[in-house]
Structures are given as structure tokens and as C-alpha cells.
Image (cartoon, coloured by chain):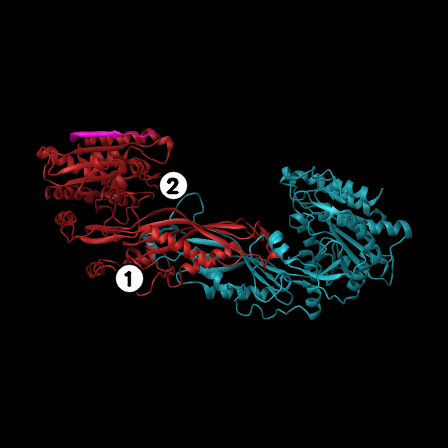
Chain colours: A red, B cyan
Amino acid sequence: MTPLNKLIEFLRIPSISSDPTHAADVRRAAEWVAAELAVLPHVEVVEAPGRHPLVYAESLAAPGKPTLLLYGHYDVQPPDPLELWHSPPFEPVIKNDNIYARGACDDKGQTLILLSALRRLIERDGRLPCNIKVLIEGEEESGGEHIEAYVPTHTEKLAADAAVICDTEMFAPGLPALCVGLRGIVYGEIHVQGPAQDLHSGVYGGVAPNPMMAMAEIFTALKNRDGLITIPGFYDAVRPPSPEETRAWSSLPFDYEHYRKTEVGSSELTGEPGLSVFDRTWARPTFEVHGIRGGFIGEGAKTVIPAVAVAKVSFRLVPDQDPATIVDQIKAAVLAATPKGITAEFKLLHAAPASSVDPSHPLIAKAATALTQTFGRETVYIRSGGSIPIVGLFQQALGIPSILMGFGLPDDGLHSPNEKFHLPNFHKGIDTVETFLLSL
Amino acid sequence: MTPLNKLIEFLRIPSISSDPTHAADVRRAAEWVAAELAVLPHVEVVEAPGRHPLVYAESLAAPGKPTLLLYGHYDVQPPDPLELWHSPPFEPVIKNDNIYARGACDDKGQTLILLSALRRLIERDGRLPCNIKVLIEGEEESGGEHIEAYVPTHTEKLAADAAVICDTEMFAPGLPALCVGLRGIVYGEIHVQGPAQDLHSGVYGGVAPNPMMAMAEIFTALKNRDGLITIPGFYDAVRPPSPEETRAWSSLPFDYEHYRKTEVGSSELTGEPGLSVFDRTWARPTFEVHGIRGGFIGEGAKTVIPAVAVAKVSFRLVPDQDPATIVDQIKAAVLAATPKGITAEFKLLHAAPASSVDPSHPLIAKAATALTQTFGRETVYIRSGGSIPIVGLFQQALGIPSILMGFGLPDDGLHSPNEKFHLPNFHKGIDTVETFLLSL
């Protein structure tokens, strides 16, 4: 059975981890992965009550060689809205070198790159050229609680020199990329209390504190119109990208107008003046408001001064910003910005530091060389503005860097209808992983 | 049957105009009012399809005398939450000189003051001392569409020298008050559009315009932290209260700390510095935010930069501020405050000018004298921060001032559980109206 036939089989399993009615499918996908890993000397399906299983496998028969921890996930996002799919999401269709199905790119296709490379090496050479541990989860799209509890309590078992994660994108078609920086996050709520109860804005408008307005005053005290965050100390630890990074980013193929119009879809890009789009989305921290609860938002008119308002907000962090310090700074800034008659407080929901990998790390360098060999173009080092929690977890619990070797394309439609995976990338991905492992 | 017995009978009818299951009760209340008005030579129940009836009556047998248009409403608010009532809302209970029932004060008790005074005069004197028109509606608590359509199309029939409205409060127990000013209102929505679709705040945070943040920037551009509205031209037409009004207000019994703690329930009162609470709530315009729709407000964390946000906002207007001019100023100020990458627009939902009555108007003066005689204390002229649409309607369509002769008390619990009416005020109200009519 070819890797492509296997991919089709894998994609047919509707392993939607957030949907309890698909629990049996999720389990079936875990067992499918375990069977695929059966070429390795040790495979186990790790259970935990109420959780989807982890699949763990290892081959430690290469003394003196590095140990890599390969990560992927076998669960997928729900396929809704179904009516927008051109073919059923769990009946893979191949068209123009792309395979269309939910999970094609995120992350069954990319997980199978890792498994297929291992299988090919073992079937051909009878053994792996280095020590390999594999950890595939089934809750990446639904909270990841199982792996979050498992990694810190199995640090010896999972000990490795680096992790390899195939769950990201290339910067552009044909251009091999390694992601060496991810932003961290502080996510929380700003709770604002004004009057003791909702008030009539006619009778009390003019003397009663208004929590919605207070929220606006707090937001604008935290960030100015130029996009600069005005929280004291907030930028203290922020370093500019290295001259090498800046040089590399400026040579990336990037069409500003296309990005503005098609990706962001706005009349103008915003943010700190004098900085490039890469600086602003990869190397600078942010403050964003996601929504505000409270007051009246129904149809028609109601003249209420609400007693309370709650905003969902987040801050993206860059390397060297310490989440605990930042949280303290946010709390102090919210207090300082609180108008009279109002009490306001920042409540943390979760935080994770930024992660970065030294591009000169020998394993990263070898991964880059493998990518360059396979794609025939120099590998570029990029960053990502988002946060991948597993990278922080591996860094924190195991003390290892993650090699983010992604084979998705920007238009693969992750989490969207008609998700696809570019088949040449699937095959080149297997070649790259094979080349990489052989180079160790 | 005494007026009190009649009040008990009237309060037993659950005439909740917003609840279609009570349509028959609403009609029963209209018929009850019509029967009570049958002492007048002409009474009619005015029907309109899909609307609750108006009750109209007239007695025009006093040539050379002024004509008054008496207004009240026979419908009531829903009694919810029922569990907070100490006795059933439609089974009136008398305790310590108060009658407890839904509608006791708002507005059956006060409507019956008008009807009882008319009946007493006719039964005793055989006639009324002036010309009287009565218009009682049944939709005051549910939109008032019937009367809104009726008044402008029946201006000749309703022609009068002044309206008398018993649907407001006294400033304090025992202190007779006439309300001579009401704020107007401009109510609308601010629509903000940022990116073409919801974006991931990790990937695009730093370059994508955020409508929630834009809303905060617009709000804070419209009003500063001192409560001063910074829309160009907004205060141009605003006059300070007259020296007489200021003097009168400063002599009103008013406990600032009690008001702050018990009525507003906040640690500090807000608003423009250097102005009294009466200035700020009666004589100054406001800008208030009622709620913001858009983005993510559920449990947990979602990192979305929403494409759109919609805020509900209102501006209270004072006399001489022209709603159309103000709307133009708001629209221009919203545009001017809109940050880059964003489109924003103010959309008007409804507007009404402030209304004011000249305290030296002869009918107002006579009403004040009648109040003073009955209560044994000098009548005070006050304003109200809210808006009573019927006052504007009478002013606009009929060109007449409204005498706002209210007998409610600040703690009567309008629209709340355990609504009550102070019975001495009920009886003194009848005496006052009788004295007033006889003085014409």
C-alpha cells in the first residue's frame, strides 16, 4: 500500500475530537496510527479516563545517535459548514495534485509524512538511523488536556534532543521554511464594575459611572492610535530581530497589496509605524480586544447604564517577555487607567511564553539542509505570530527545542471547508524527513 | 363607591399591554376607564387594528374658559419577577398608608386622580368649571404606537390650552413639584467594519484593524474623562439653567451621600466638574454607551479579531439642542474619530427634542398654586433627566405645553416588584386637580 493510499484510508476516519458522537471514530484513528507504527519495536495506546488516547512508539536502537521526538495529531476539526464543501469531507478526492478532505493538511497528511518516512527507512534499511520517539495526540483540536498532563509526568520516557513537529505551513509554494519563533500569549478578561445595579440613562446619565465607557478609557490607555502599547515596562524585554533575520525576512517573496486586500481584507494595514509587516506580526507584542459582554445589544433601543462589563482581551508576547511580569504590568496599568467611580481588574485565563529556536542549533541546521536538498531552494527561517502550545510544553517540560518543519501551504484552508493538502508536498515531506534522519 | 374602592377595582385588572395573552384584560381596563368617564357628555373607545384602544372623553360646556387635555394610561408593566412580590401584584393590599399592586402609581392611581376629580366636580356642582378633554392610552408600556398615530391626525379634536399629565414623581414626600423640563434623546448605533472577515489574532495581530479597539477610540474621542462631550458644536445651543432655577435647585432637599450610595450605588459620582448633580442630570446633555455587539464573549478563550462591531449609544439633549443638527455633528465626529483601516458610521434609531415649559405660563402658575394650597408647602419647579415622548408629541402636534403634575414618590418602585402608591398622595392629588380646575 503506497503512502497515498494510506492517506486516503486515514482521511476516511471522521475523527472529530470535539464531537462526542465521533468518539468511536477518534479511537479508530488512534488504532490506525498505532498499527501504522507497528514497524517500531514498541508501540502503546495511552489511555486516560474521559480523554482521547495518545499513541506512543519508540525505537532506541541507535546508540550514540541523537534522539528525536516526533509529534503530530490524528484528530480533526468539525467539517461545518458542510454545504460549502465541493465533495464530502470524509471522502477524499484528488484534483490537480491536491487531496481534498478534512484533516488533509491539518494534520493527518503531515502526521503521515513522519510515519511514512519511518516505515520507508525500516522497510528498506531494516532499522532507523537515529533514536526515535513518536507521540501522536487526538485532542489537538479540542483542548489537548491529555498530552498536557502526560508530558510533564513522563519526562524521562520522552527525553530527547529535539522535537520534530509537522503541523505548520511553508511561507510560499516551493519555498522550504523552518519556523524558529512563535509568539506567546497572555489571555484574560477585564472585569469592570460601575453602579451597584443597572441604571436608567435618562435619570442618571451625567453622574453615574458607565462601565462600557470605562472599558473604552482603559483600552485606549493601554494602546495608542499608532498601535504602540503604553503599559509601563511592557517593551522592556523586547529585542529587535537580529540583522540576519531582518535581512532574511526582507528577501521573502511578499506582495503587500495582495496581503492587505486578500488576506487581511482591509483598506489599510495598522500597527506601529516604521516597522515591516513581519516585524509587526512576528517580532512585536500585541494587545487585542476580542469582545465585550454587558449592557444591551438586542434589537431596538434600551437606555441602560449597565452595572458591569467584561472584556475578553489578549496580549501576544515575543521572546524574553516573561508572562508573569507582563501580567503584573497589565494589572497595574488597568488599575492606573480605571476612571473614577469604577472598579476594574484584569483576570488571567492562561499564559504561555514565546518560544524561539536558535537557527544555529546543529539539529535545526541539519533540518534546513534536508529541506534545501529536497526542494532545491535555500530554506528560509521564518517566525509565526501565533502560539503553538505543544512547543512551549516540550521546551518547558523536556527542555528541548522544536523543529517546526511544516509542509502546508497558505491556501490549504485549515479549519475551513474544502481543506486540501498539496500532494507534491506530501511526497517531498517524506523525502525531507528521511533525508534529515539519515543526516544525523 | 369611594375613589379608593374604585382604585382597588381598577388595580385588579391585569392590563399588561406588552403581553398578548392579556389582551382581553387590557380591553377590560379600557372599558372600565370609559365607564368611569361616563359622567362626561361624550365618551368613546377609539379602536385601531392590532392596537389597544384609546379612551377619549370631553366636556366642552364652559365657554370662555380654558380647555385642558388630561392624559394618563391604563396599561401596566409585566409584574415579573413574581417571586419578589410580598403579595400578588393584581390583588391590591393596603399597608401603612400605601396601596401595593402593579400599576398602583404607574399609572392607574395617577390616572384615577384625574377621573375622580372630574367625577367629584360633576356630582357636586353638576358641571365642570372649564373645558376638559381626556385621552387615556393603553400602550404606554409597550411602544405607544396608537396614540402616536392618533394625536397628529386629530389635532382639531384635541386642541387645548395645555395638557395635564399625572405620570411623574414628586421630588420628595410632602414637597409638591412641577416638572418643567425633560431631556430629549438621540438614540442610535455605531457600526464599525474592520477586516473583511474574522481574523486570527495571532497571525494578524499587529497589522489588522480591530473594530472593538476602534470603537473604544471613537468613544473616547466623543467624550473625555471629565465627562465633557468633545463633539465639535455639540454644546453650542446649550444654555445654563436660569439663575432662578439654579437658586431653586440649590434649595431642594438633597442628600448627596445617600443619593451616591443608595440610588446610584457607586464609590464616586462622575461627570463634568464644577456642576451640581441637578445641572448634570437635568441641564446638561450626555453621551452613554449601552452595549457593544461583536467578537467573542462566551466562556473561555477565543483569539478573534472580529470583522464588525455594533454599539448601542444614546445622547440626552437639553432645550434648544436640535436633534437633526446633533445627529449631523455626531456623524461627522464619528467619521473624524475613525482610525485607519476602519469604516464607521452612526445610524440613527430615533430622536426627540428636549421639552420645557415656561414656569411663568399662567396655567403652570395656577397649577403650582393649587399644589401649594393642597400640600401646604411652596411648589418647587424641577426638571427630569429622562424623556417622556407624549410631552414632545403634544408640543409638536398640538402646540401646547404639558403640566407635569406628578404624585408618585421616589420609592414607589415603578416597573419593580412591590410597586406602591402613597394613599395620602392619591387623595391630595384629587384635591389638587379639583382646586386647579376651579381656579381657572
Return the residue nearer the eye: B57 or B237.
B237
Return the residue nearer the eye: B69 or B299.
B299
* Secondary structure found at label 1: loop
Q: Chain of mark 1?
A: A
Mark 1 is on which residue type?
Ser
Q: Are marks 2 and 1 in contact (CB under 8 Å)?
A: no
Residue for point 74% across, 53% down: B173
The Cα atoms of the two marked residues, 2 and 1, are separated by: 35 Å
Residue B80: % across, % down: 63, 41
Return the residue nearer the eye: B202 or B283.
B283
Q: Is residue B55 left or right of residue A382?
A: right
Residue extending furthest toward the left: A125
Q: Which residue is mark 1?
A: A276
Residue B258: % across, % down: 63, 54
* Secondary structure found at label 2: loop
Residue B283: % across, % down: 64, 64
Q: Is residue A175 left or right of residue B117?
A: left
| Magenta region includes residue A1 | no
Q: Chain of mark 2?
A: A
Q: Which residues are magenta?
A: A39-49
**Residue B160 in view, yes or no:** yes
Q: Which residue is mark 2?
A: A81
Mark 2 is on which residue type?
Pro
Question: Pointer 1: residues within 10 angstroms few (<14), some, or many (20+)?
Answer: some
| Image disc number at residue B283 | none
Residue extending furthest toward the right: B125
Q: Nearer the viewer, mark 2 or mark 1?
A: 1
Residue B411: % across, % down: 68, 49
Asked if badges 2 and 1 are on one and the same chain, I answer yes
Residue for point 83% across, 62% down: B66
Q: Quadrant of the C terminus of chain B?
A: bottom right
| Magenta region includes residue A45 | yes
